[in-house]
Image (cartoon, rainbow, N blue to C red):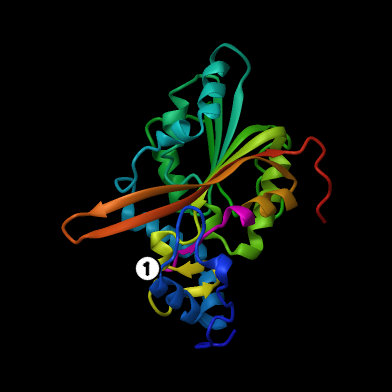
Amino acid sequence: TTHGKMATKEISDKDLGHAIRKLNVDEIKKLETEEVISNFKRDKLEREAQKNWDLFYKRNSTNFFKDRHWLTKEFPDLLQAVKESINSRRLVLLEAGCGVGNAVFPLLRESDQLFVYACDFSPRAVEFVKSNSHYSEERCFAFQCDLTVSDSLSSNIPRNSVDFVSLIFVLSAISPEKHRDVLRNIAEVLKPGGQVLMRDYGLYDHAMLRFGRGHKIEDSFYTRQDGTRAYYFSTEETEKLFIDSGYEVVENSYKKSETVNPKEGISAVRVFVQGKFSKKNSLKSTE
């Protein structure tokens, strides 16, 4: 697509929103008339993705992030499995896209029998994890990794050895044409029947509808001011993505929250997609 060309997708009746988020006339018009960025800028963002995330963590350090205790609140099966591991076998979790470890360390405190692999695209984020006072190589192995690259996980983690994978706001940061690569690479290290716990940005989220000119890469995919990117998922798309990559759908739904700013009279509807997906017992080749 050349610079300045209008996005060609026309919005039909079925695109007027979904069960969680309906669109008004102005929002529909905005989506219909958004221009996509040039191929040159798109390619530059792809090349500099790691650098942009590294700079993000440099700017924000660890003070910006709160511990993600909600991971076990939103996925109670994970907490139950962690607690049950206390008196039984070791439980293995992979946090794909671990950031600075905000989900890792609260979980490690739940059970001595939990072992966590933690990887991130950003070398700086991985260093933050390793420098955490709670980091111990007996309980956790953190490493830098490009999830889209073949063998990137299986060269660090034994195949078919992981019980759970958390994939929290990770796929959205990756070009959509590489999403299946990520899920297939995860499947290599996940046990048959093991689960991926996913939460990410949902279609028509408040943030998606607020992007100005010059931020749209393609339908549902945008670049932020700092060069990091965000993709916004529909539940239908998420289901197909996982099924095509060798998983069965356990749960898959929109989650909604509303933030109100009384002073400005602004209501922000945040939309997320959340699901649990189980690796099929006999993963067929997806070549």
Q: Position of residue 176 (x, y in %)?
A: 61, 63
Label 1 belongs to which residue? 210
- With respect to residue 115, does 119 lie above or below? below
Please say whether residue 283 is visible from this viewpoint.
yes
> Which of the two residues, 177 or 254, is positioned nearer the viewer here?
254
- Residue 89 percent location from the top left of the image: 63, 17
In the image, 26 versus 73, the foreground residue is 26
Residue closest to the far top: 87
Q: Residue at x 47, y 35 (%)?
A: 74
Residue in the image at 41% along x and 30% along y: 106
Q: Residue 224 is drawn in which quadrant?
A: bottom left
For the residue carrying disc 1, how many other residues have a C-alpha within 10 Å: few (<14), some (14-19), or many (20+)?
A: few
| Residue 3 position in % (x across, y down) | 52, 87
Left or right, residue 238 beside residue 125: right
| Image quadrant in which the N terminus is located | bottom right
Residue 4 at what x, y percent from top left? 50, 88
Which residue of the protein is positioned furthest toward the front in this rendering? 13
Is 287 on the left-hand or right-hand side of 21?
A: right
Q: Is residue 81 above or below residue 21?
A: above
Could you tell whether 143 is left or right of 285 in the image? Answer: left
Q: Report helix, strand or loop for mark 1.
A: helix
Circle 1: residue type? Arg
Asked whether residue 148 appears in the rendered view, the answer is no
Closer to us: 245 or 125 = 245
Image quadrant in which the C terminus is located: bottom right
Q: Per the image, is 269 magenta?
A: no
Report the magenta residues as a range: 226-237
- On screen, residue 202 above or below 197: below
